[in-house]
Amino acid sequence: MPNRASIYAERSRIVILIFIGVFFVFWIRLFYLQILDSTYKTDAENNAFRKKTQYAGRGLIYDRNGELLVYNEAVYDLMIIPIQAANTDWAHLAELIEIDEAGAVQRYKKARAYSRYAPSVFEKQLSKETYGRLQEHLYMFPGFYVHSRTLRRYPHAVAAHVLGDVGEISEDELLRLEPEGYKSGDYIGKSGLEKYYENDLKGQKGVKMIMVDVLNREKGSYKDGAFDSAAIAGENLYTSLHLGLQAYAERLMKGRRGSVVAIEPKTGEILALVSSPGYDPNLLVGRKRSQNYQVLLNDTVKPLFDRALMAFYPPGSIFKIPQALIALQEGVIKPYTGFVCDRSLLGCHNHPSATSVPEGLKMSCNPYFYQVFKRVLMQGRSDNRFVDSRLGLDVWCEYMGRFGFGQQLDIDLPNVKTGFIPNSAFYDRIYGHNQWAFSTIYSLSIGQGEVGLIPLQMANLAATVANRGYYITPHIVKTIGEARRVPGRDTARHETGIDADFFEVVIRGMYGAVHEEGGTARRARIPHIAVCGKTGTSENPHGKDHSVFIAFAPMDDPQIAISVFIENHGFGGTWAAPLGSLLIEKYLTDTVTRPELERMLDDALKPVVAKPKPAERPQTREPLMAPLPQMMPQLGTAPLGMPSTGTPAPNVPQPQPSSPTPTTEP
Ligand SMILES: [Zn+2]
């Protein structure tokens, strides 16, 4: 009989072997489950492990001097995995995050309908306080966890249209962009730079595997993060915007409708881009975003509509600049060609007849440019005046295209319009082939009629003149990311094909308009700075005329080219010119030496107490020409129901001139 000791030894060996065997089987099973069996893996993600998306911080946006325009702020999304959340105390949860219980159940059902296993956002963008309160109770809510994200913030609340906004991806966008890695609940650039540079700004999402205990508490990363991938932050945008100029332009345009565009001529860099009325970009962020968006959308003055890029207007007298240049280049006039101010051709104001191109521009004589345009169109290429006009217009259109008119300037913002330059085919459609001639379309000579420019094109015209013959595609982003990568955009010189000498001729006229007796832009004078400008008054069939001014300065070394367009504001020389002049001074000298101009502009917006009735005033202005049929082409529907030339909104106080109206100014 074996002794008891050997029996025990034998038994313990068996027990150990059994233990080892069982352990081995378990180990194999575990290996299989964790590594080989994907069904368990899915289950694991939903139970003991949580796969958390790590959202990348969007790139920041800076102005040209390194001032921060857009940064990120942390917020918290409450996530739900529906299959684990069936027994939730909805009343308690709703109370914690300040929503109603029915709404909470509704969200649960919606999430379950989307997927029972995959996480969905239950409540977006909890504040730090709400998050703090919820965190203490989170263990009571299996299937819920919190995800940190970031929202955009705008420390200066300027340039809303340019910067654009970020919102949750729509179903349409998701359908299109899912292959690129977008998921429901992701944020995406919706407008402005946020949209145009979405791929640079968005960065790359990461993943973190987190272990969770039975009480829904996160217990650190799984396998020391072996399966994690870090989020990669988006790239910063370094723009050409000048914060000080942008803010000052927005301040001067406040209460007015229209736009300001400022460009550095030699680089094509946009210094300021204002559409007024604007809005505080912080309104389109966070939980109040959709509510605020609706309010802005329904606002009768259309603050979401970017007038600088999307509204096109007859340019008025600033169009005399390209008219003169084309005629000089075609050789149909000389710099010293004079024309009598014959008001039987076109209405004009009281001034001596111009004996040169600079004088014609300085005094902005309408009959002068009637003759100039006539010579461009009717060059005697055919004895038939219809055919001759058609051939002339074809040449003219070609030149206009080289100024970037009637075509899209390739600015790095979405939704820029082309404006409109009418061509022969257009007039054939209206009047019939060989049924129109110069006499039909002469109103184009002074920038009225069917021609339409967007304010960006007007500023680009000023830049083209400043450069004596070419422009660089206007753009906002100078470099991307820390490597300062230059965006792959067209920044080539766009040549007008017009001699630099002819530009000097019109520059002489633009200088005279500002600095000489009889000039129409005298209110744009700045002490010690040679400003070259041109006023315009754009006829508005819907109401009061629009006030226009383009300029560049200093004359010999242009640093800034600008367009100011103010809707329903009357004469360009009275309003747009001083406003533009203040901006030029502010940019070039960082000071404003003429506060009286600021005051005049401010006063113009104050309610008028007692004014003489219009009938008591002398009639200062005769119609320039018989009204043309309204045939402004519809180049795509203006968004938000915005007509191409704005009509006055009924509830907006219309600015009134507070100073004596000049006799007339074309
Ligand atoms: Zn005249």
Image: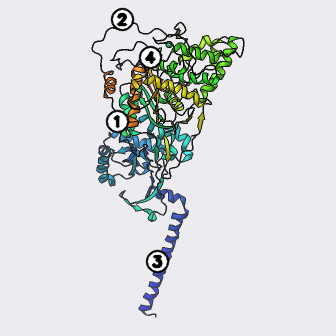
Q: Which is in the foreground here, disc 3 or disc 2?
A: 2
Q: Which amino acid type is marked by label 2?
A: Ala
Q: Which residue is mark 4?
A: 545
Whole-angstrom CA distance, mark 2 to mark 4, is: 18 Å
> In the shown orientation, is residue 458 left or right of residue 583?
right
Q: Please give the name of the residue rendered at 72% of the width and 14% of the height, measured from the top-left corner.
A: 382
504 is higher (above) or lower (below) than 652: below
Q: Amino acid at mark 4?
A: Asp
Which of pointers 1 and 4 lies earlier in the amino acid sequence? 4
Q: Residues within 10 Å of mark 1 (few under 14, many from 20)?
A: few
Q: Which residue is mark 1?
A: 591
**Magenta range:** 645-666
Q: Is residue 651 magenta?
A: yes
- Res. 19 mark: 3
Q: Nearer the viewer, mark 1 or mark 3?
A: 1
What's the distance in space between the residues labelled 3 and 2, CA to CA?
Answer: 110 Å
Residue at x 48%, y 74% (from the top left corner): 23
